[in-house]
Amino acid sequence: MQELTQYLFSGITTGAIYAVIAVGLSMLYASTELINFAHGEFVMVGAMALVTLWVHLGLPLPVAILGAIALGCTIGLLFERFAIRTARSPQPIVLIIITVGASIFLRGLGMITWGKDPFGVPSFSSHDSIEILGAALVAQSFWIVGAAILLAGGIHFFLKQTLTGKAMVACAVNRKAAWLTGIPSETMAVLAFAISTGCGAVAGIFIAPITMSSYDMGTILGLKGFCAAMIGGIGSLWGAFAGGILLGVLESMGAGLISSGLKDAIAFILLLLILYIRPGGLFAAKEAKRF
Amino acid sequence: MAQNTKKLWIEHSLFLAVVLVAGLFLENAYYLQILTFIGINTLLALGLNMLMGYAGQVSLGHAAFYGIGAYTTAILSGTFGISPWLALVAATGAAVFIAFVVGLPTLKLSGYYLGMGTLGFGMIVNILFREWAPVTGGASGFVGIPPLAAGPVNFMSGRAYFFLVWGVVLAAILICRRILASRMGRALRSIHDGENASLAVGVNTHALKLQIFMFSAGLGAVAGFLYAHFVLFISPGSFGFMASVKMVTMVVIGGMASVWGALFGAALLTLLPEVLHGFAEYEMVVFGLILMGVMIFLPQGLTKGFMDLISKRRRRDHSRP
C-alpha cells in the first residue's frame, strides 16, 4: 500500500510534466495541424535557461522563471517566422523534417551554450517532504502539479472567455471560415506557437529541480509528451492533460511493479494501443483520420 | 518503351562501371570504408523510398528493421555459431514477419498517425535492444560478430566487402526497378496520388501497402546484416529514433520517388558527418541548419530541386530575345 501510494505520487508528479508538454503540443496541433518534433527542445531551453538565470546569475526566482519562459517563446516565434512560414511546401512530411532539423539545431545550440555536463537545480521552496499514508511527497511535487493545473486552467480561460481565445478556437475548427469572418488566422498561428513553446519552457522550468538538466534532455521528454497527447486525444486541451497524468501514473506503476528497464517502453506501447483501438484518443470527440 | 529500356541499360552499366573503377583503383582504406557505408545506407534509403516515395506512407521507425537485421545475425552467428548466410535468411525472414504483424494494424492509419505509430514501434524495438541485456548485450553493445566468408572468398578485406555491398545494392536497384515497372508499381503510385481513387479502380490498397512495407523491411534487414558483419560490433544507439530520422532524411533530401535520389541522399548523409567533423562542436548546429534549409527551400529534394532550378533558368534564357 505504502509503495503504491509512493508510485502514485511520483507518477502524478512526472505526469503533470508530461501534461504540460502535451498541452503545448496539442494547442499547436489544434490551431496549425503541425506536430512539432522540436517541442522537447523547448523543454530543454526552459530548464537550461533557469539554470543560468537562477542558479548561475542569482536572479530572483520569479524573474528567472519569466525570463526562461520569455526565451522559450522568443525562440518559438523565430522558429515559426524563419522555418515554418518560409517553407514552400506545407506537406506533413516536409514539416516533420523541418521540425526534426530544428530539434537537432536547438540541441546543438544548447550544447554550445551550456556544454555537455548535466546541471542540478535546488527545489523551489525548502519545505520538508510531507508524509501521507507512509509515502513521502516532496514539496516540488506541489509546485509542479500546481503549475500544471494553473497553466491548463489559464489556457482554458483564455480559449473560452477572451475574444482572442475564441478566435483561436474558430481557427482550429475551420481556418478558412475563420479567415472569412475577419479573424487574422496568420496571427493566431503565431500566437499558438508562442503559447505552445512557452508551455514547453514551463515544463522544463518545473522539472529542473527533480532531474538533471542537460542539452539532450529534451528529445525523450518531447516524445513522451507526444504519446501523452495522443493518448488523451491530440487537439483537445483537457484530453492531452489527462493523457499526461495517466501516462505518468502508468509509467511509475509499471516501473515499480514490473520492471524499471521497460519504463520508457510503456509510453510507446500505450501509444500503439491507443492508435489501434481508438486513434482519436481517449477523451477526444473527433474521430481521427483513419483510412 | 524500347528507348526507355536502353536508357536504363546505360544507367545501370554506368553505375556498374563507377563501382568497378572505385573498387579496383581506390587504395585508401578509409575511402573504401566510407563508400561501403554509403552502399549500406543506400539499401536503407531504397527500401524506405519504395514505401515513402512511391506508396506515400511515412515511417518514422524504420531503423527498427535495420536493427532487427543486425541483431538477429549477431545473435545467431555470434552467440550460437550458426553460419552467417543462414542467419541472413533468418534475419530477413524475421524482419519481414515482424513488418507483417506490425503493418497489419498500423498501415490502416494515415498521415501523422501512421508516423506516430511507426515511431512508437521503432522506440519499443530500440528499448528492447537496450534492456534485453543477456541476449543483445544491452546498452554497451554486442561484441563478437564473426566476419563473413563464402567458401574460398573471404570478406575480411575492405575491398572485398565493398564489392559485396555494392553488388547487393545493384541487385536491389534492379529489383526495385522491376517492381516499379510492374502492375504493382503503377498501383503503388496510384495510392500515392489518391488512395480513394485507386481503391475505386480496384486496387487492394491495404494489401499492397503491407507488401511494400514488408519489402522495405526486408531490405532494411539485409542492410543491417551487412552493417553488423562489416563493423563487427553493434549497439542500440545505431538503431534509435535518430537513425530512423536519418533514413527518412536520406529519402527526402535525395528526392522522393527516385531510385538514384536514394543513392544520392544516402551518399550525402553519410559524407556530411565526416565533413562536419571539422566543425567539432558546431556539427549538430550545421547539420540541423542544412536539414531545415533544404526542406524549406527545396522540398522536392536536392536532385529534383536543382533540376527544376536549371530548367527554370533555361526556360527564362529561351524566352529572352
Image (spheres, coloured by chain):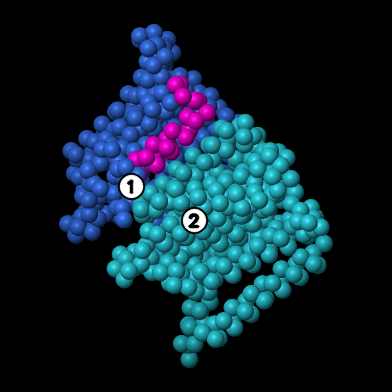
Q: Main secondary structure of the magenta part?
A: helix
On-image quarter of the N terminus of chain A: top left
Mark 1–mark 2 distance (CA, rounded to whole Å): 31 Å
Q: Is residue B210 above or below residue A254?
A: below
Q: Judging from the image, what is the letter of the chain drawn in cyan? A: B
Q: Residue at x 29, y 28 (%)?
A: A150
Q: Could you say whether the residue bearing mark 1 is in a helix, strand or loop?
A: helix
Q: Is residue B131 magenta?
A: no
Of residues A277 and A81, the one nearer the viewer is A277
Q: Circle 1 sits on which residue?
A: A29
Q: Give coordinates of residue B222: x percent, y percent.
A: 61, 55
Q: Is residue B14 left or right of residue A55?
A: right
Instruction: Report the mark closest to the observer, 1 or 2.
Output: 2
Quadrant showing the C terminus of chain A: bottom left
State which chain is coloured blue: A
Look at the image and say whether residue A261 sits in the magenta stretch.
yes
Q: Residue at x 68, y 64 (%)?
A: B167
Residue B46 position (above or below residue A96) = below
The amino acid type found where label 1 is placed reads: Tyr
Which chain letter goes with mark 2? B
Residue A185 lies, in percent from the top left, at 27, 54
SS of the residue at dot 2? helix
Q: Quadrant of residue B44?
A: bottom right
Q: Residue at 56% across / 51% down in the picture?
A: B93
Q: Start and end of the magenta stretch?
A: A255-275
| Residue A107, percent from left and from top | 53, 42
Q: Is residue B272 left or right of residue B56?
A: right
- List the residue tagged with mark 2: B214
